[in-house]
Amino acid sequence: MQVKLIKTGGVLGKTMSSSQEWEFSEKEWGELIEAVEKKEKASKRIPDATNYALQKENGDEIRVDISSVPPKYQSFFKKLFEGLKVEKR
């Protein structure tokens, strides 16, 4: 399945993204999202804050907490971070 990591915000405020093809079963995808999905809503805009989202094959973006990535998925996120590039608009 094609998975996209989207990074927004930060000091420069540029949107960056990276896509990887990865073999996830639906169960594994569900486990990953359950572990990393941000549960709280952003109540205030924080200057220079960096936000992350995952998107599966043109599905909805899911806001994620990068600090919650389970060890099992660290290599997947490492590849996504290595491929981050500024999105052209």
Image: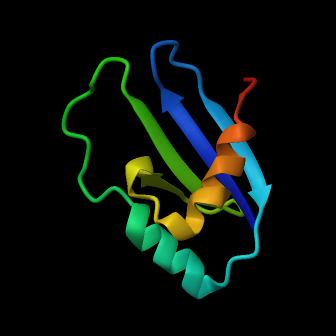
In terms of image quadrants, where is residue 3? bottom right
| x 75%, y 39%: residue | 83
Side (left or right) of 21 relative to 71:
right
| Residue found at the very far front of the displayed protein | 71
| x 73%, y 23%: residue | 89
In the rendered view, tell whether residue 28 sits above or below residue 1.
below
| Residue 63 image offset from top left, x and y in percent | 43, 52
In terms of image quadrants, where is residue 48? top left
| Residue 73 image offset from top left, x and y in percent | 58, 65
Q: How is the image coloured?
A: rainbow
Residue nearest the viewer, comparing 63 with 23: 23
| Residue 61 image offset from top left, x and y in percent | 53, 54
Side (left or right) of 78 relative to 62:
right
In terms of image quadrants, where is residue 82? top right
| Residue found at the very far left of the displayed protein | 43
Residue nearest the viewer, comparing 36 with 9: 36
In the rendered view, tell whether residue 40 sits above or below residue 50.
below
| x 65%, y 58%: residue | 75
In the rendered view, tell whether residue 14 sits above or below residue 71.
above
| Residue found at the very far top of the displayed protein | 12
In the rendered view, tell whether residue 49 sits above or below residue 47.
below
| x 57%, y 81%: residue | 28
Quarter placement of the N terminus: bottom right
| Residue 50 image offset from top left, x and y in percent | 43, 30
